[in-house]
Every structure is written in C-alpha cells, then in structure tokens.
Amino acid sequence: AKFNNTQGRTCIVNLAAIGYSVTTIAGALSLAAENCAVTTLPNTDALCAGAISGISAQVSQLAGAAALTNEMCDPVGKNAIPAGTVPSHLGQPEMDRRLAEPNATTGSAQARRLLWGGGYGAGATQCAVDAASISWWLAQAGLAINAAANTNAGASCPGKHFRKTLDKFGKGPMKELGEFVKGACTVDVAGAIFAFGQVIQYLQFAVVHCSDQLNVNALCGAGIDGMVSSLAGMASSGSALWMTCV
C-alpha cells in the first residue's frame, strides 16, 4: 500500500473529530448535571467541567478544521487526491497491485484504488448526522440568543443604561458584578456565533456526505468555517471557565 499526504491529513481530521465528539459528550453531561438538578443553587463544579470540556472540544475542532483546510484549499493538496476519489473512500491507502491478482484475467483490469473513509454506509450515516447536527445547532443558537436578550430568561446582555450604571463603579462588589455580567453576555453572544458557524459547517459537510461527491470547494469552506467558529466557541467557553472555575 502507498500512503500519501491525503491519508495523513484525513487521519488527523478523523482523530480530531473523535476528540471533538468525546469532549462534547463530556461537556453535555456536565451541563446536564447542572440543568437537571432539583435545586436553584448553581453547581459551579459541573459548569466548570463543562467549560473545560468545551475548550477541549473546540481545540480538537480547530486542529481538524486546519488539516481539512490544508488539504482542500491548497492547490497542491487538491491535486494530490487521485481522480475519481469519493468521500466514503477518501483517506484509504492506494494499492500498488490488484487486490486479487490471481483473479485478474485481462491486462486492462484496473486495480481497485480506495483512497475519507469508512465506506458507503459510513457516508450515509454521516449524512444523517449532518442533518441532525444542523437542527441541533440551530436550536442552540436560538437558546443562546434567548438567554442573551430575553428579559424573562435572565437577559445576560442587559440594556446600555444598566451597563453604564455598573461602569460607574471602579471597585467593590458592584464592579465585580459588572465584570460578571460582561462575562455572561460573552458566553451567550459568542455561543450564538459559534452555533451559527456550526450550522454553516454541517451544511457544507452535508453537500459532500449526502451526495458522496468530493466537492473540494464545500470541504474547503467547511474547514475555514470550522476554524473561525471554533475561535468563537473558545471565547464562549473561556468566559464560562473564568466565571465558574476561577
């Protein structure tokens, strides 16, 4: 088997996706421990764990998106992908000989070259995951906007008159309250930006996975969007970490 840069970068993308998925699940479980608790007192330990898991997930996404961008946006990387490659087989090693050499009866028989991988079943599953993820992140964006602006839900981003009042205090508890309010607002606003970025990324992934056609422009866009949205996610999780862990 012959291994090339395409396979190496695909491996990085897949490993980063695994890291992202595991840490996202850990973060969701931590937040569930807070959201589902039968108490009005915040569980700062669970919120802190959720923030740390969030940052870990976004670092994984940044790494995978960077590798994807490097492969799909760089003309050299795109040209290294063998012709006829489809997403369900991208990343598999090229074979230097026929897989069943004794059964090859004609000189014109082509060696099977499976060069992202998992096969057609994995691609179809990923298509369903993309569709579900689009709905999920649209809901998350709506929740973040609601938390930031709806006064009945706390309105973490208060009106300018309230902010100006808090800004008048240079020290003491009121200043700390003002900093806390800014942090909470950052969590929700950056979280909404991150969620919308995820929607765009999964839309671009769906174009590829659901058609099993290697649309390098869509994958290039998904990589760039993944890097940008991961930075917004880090801003949200970083603010949450400062509020709950420090």
Image (cartoon, rainbow, N blue to C red):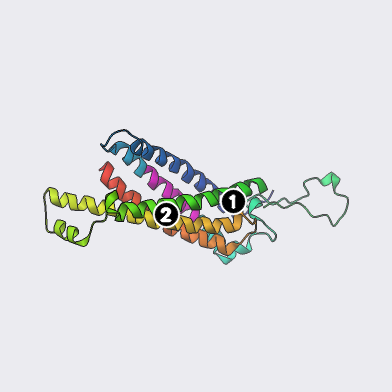
| Residue under the image location 43 percent in, 51 percent down | 139
| Residue under the image location 52 percent in, 46 percent down | 15
Between discs 2 and 1, the one toward the N terminus: 1
Taking the view exactly as shown, the residue that stands out farthest to the right is 105
Q: Is residue 64 magenta?
A: yes
* Residue type beneath disc 2: Ala
Is residue 131 shown left or right of residue 159? right
The tag on residue 195 is 2
Q: Residues within 10 Å of mark 1 (few under 14, many from 20)?
A: many
The tag on residue 246 is none
Q: Is residue 17 above or below residue 78?
A: above
Q: Which residue does the numbered mark 1 point to in the structure image?
A: 127
For the stretch drawn in magenta, what is the main secondary structure? helix
| Residue under the image location 55 percent in, 64 percent down | 74
Q: Are marks 2 and 1 in contact (CB under 8 Å)?
A: no
- Give x and y (percent) for residue 89: 66, 51
- Give x and y (percent) for residue 33: 36, 35
Question: What element does badge 2 sit on?
Answer: helix
* Residue type beneath disc 1: Cys
Residue range in magenta is: 52-65
Is residue 226 shown left or right of residue 217? left
Q: Is residue 216 magenta?
A: no
